[in-house]
Image (cartoon, rainbow, N blue to C red):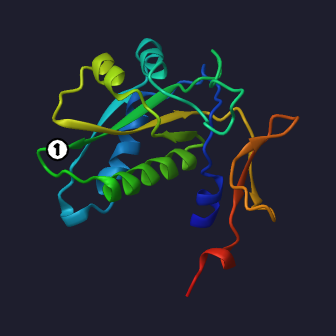
Amino acid sequence: MLRDWVTKNRSYRRFYEDTPIDRATLRELVNLARLSASGSNLQPLCYILSWEPERNAQIFQCLAWAGYLVDWTGPVEGERPSAYIVILGDQQVRDQFDTDCGIAAQSIMLGATEKGLGGCMIGSIQRAALRGVLDIPERYKILLVLALGKPKEKVVIDEVGQDGDIRYWRDDEDVHHVPKRRLDDIIVG
């Protein structure tokens, strides 16, 4: 059921790094994005796939992880993603990508969830460094990096408390908590 996939599709930031994801799997996930809706059907998105440890390490160095967890600098070796998909916007096709990028990223992440994988959509990127590492031509705008792997952490959804704090956090057992607003609080009409 779709609700189950959406609920299971959390932002995972720690993985079993030694569980590989191959190129064919990444292509299947991007194909889901390709088949998804696109504004004016312009299809301005392109993708870079990474599944090799050396290239993954280069991408990892260009990312920032979990801004609300101030004492955590990101996954340690052995818990890093085993694959990445970099989403690019082809500026020769269009100059706005927000809607297409969101649709594509969610399609990929739901497909990953269906395969027993998890991931994190990362927008906090050292774009100039990533452009250099991956030799990305200037015509492509770097939109998101999707970090993928077999999740090594438990993520749970909580209801936002009385204080309205939406910041995610980890408890003493390293369970990652994600507060979500109540349905009645977000429907305004």
Q: Give the residue at the far front of this rendering.
A: 163
Query: Which residue in the protein does label 1 denote?
Result: 91
Amino acid type of the residue that numbered disc 1 sits on in the rendered structure: Gln
Query: Is 171 placed above or below 113 here?
Result: above
Relative to 75, 119 lies left or right: left
Q: Residue 76 location in percent, x, y? A: 65, 18
| In-front residue for pair 125/14 | 125
Q: Mark 1 falls on what kind of element?
A: loop
Is residue 1 visible in this depiction of the protein? no
Decide: few, some or many residues near mark 1? Use Cα within 10 Å; few <14, some 14-19, many ≥20: some
Q: Residue at x 47, y 35 (%)?
A: 124
Percent coordinates x, y for residue 65 in the rendering: 57, 31
Q: Find residue 77 and report its image quarter.
A: top right
Compared to residue 136, the image places residue 119 above or below, namely below
Considering the image in quadrants, where does the C terminus appear?
bottom right
Residue 93 placement, left or right of 108: left
Residue extending farthest right: 172
In the foreground, 3 or 147: 147
Quarter in which the N terminus is drawn: bottom right
Horizontal and vertical percent position of residue 119: 55, 39
Residue at 61%, 66% in the rendered image: 3
Residue drawn at 43 percent across, 23 percent down: 51
Q: Nearer the viewer, residue 115 or 56?
A: 56
Displayed quadrant of residue 73: top right
